[in-house]
Amino acid sequence: MSRAGVIGTAGVEPPPQPADRKLKIVREVKPTYTPEAREAKLAGVAKMEILVDENGRVSSAQVLEGPDVFHQAAIDAVRQWEFKPPGRTVKTTVEMVFSLRW
């Protein structure tokens, strides 16, 4: 599975690759930790299903799995992603890894 990095005090991991390898990410926005997650030193993965429209923009995003505390940050980040226009609407899944390094 693919993974996305996190900015903050977290290290940066390799950029994510969507499950549909035909999609190429051209702009990636990394999720940020909420103060509550950072204070509690929480880590986890948010697995999301996204729809990428024919112009390469994320038109829909929902979290399928992962700690509730990361849901909104993951959605906010992935909605800003841009892909090379696929020419059709594509449904795919991506994972965002939230891992603080102390």
Image: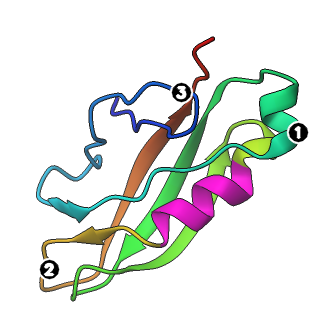
Majority secondary structure in the magenta region: helix
- Of callouts 1 and 3, the N-terminal one: 3
Residues 90 and 66: in front is 66
Indicate the amino acid at tag 3: Ala
Compared across the picture, whether 42 is left or right of 43 comes to right
Based on the displayed image, in which of its 4 quarters is residue 16 positioned?
top left
Residue under label 2, please give it: 85
Which residue sits furthest top? 102
Instruction: Indicate the position of residue 94 as horizontal and vertical percent values.
Output: 41, 47
For residue 29, above or below residue 85 = above
Mark 2 or mark 1, whichever is nearer to me: 1
Residue under label 1, please give it: 36
Indicate the amino acid at tag 1: Glu
Residue under label 3, please give it: 10
Identified at 78% across, 21% down, the residue is 41
Dots 2, 1 in contact, CB < 8 A: no
Instruction: Indicate the position of residue 60 as horizontal and vertical percent values.
Output: 51, 77
- Of callouts 2 and 1, the N-terminal one: 1
Q: CA distance from mark 3 to mark 2?
A: 30 Å
Instruction: Indicate the position of residue 13 as horizontal and vertical percent values.
Output: 35, 28
Q: CA distance from mark 1 to mark 3?
A: 15 Å
Q: Is residue 95 magenta?
A: no
Q: Is residue 73 magenta?
A: yes
Magenta part of the protein: which range?
Answer: 71-79
Position of the C terminus by quadrant: top right
Is disc 1 placed on a helix, strand or loop?
Answer: helix
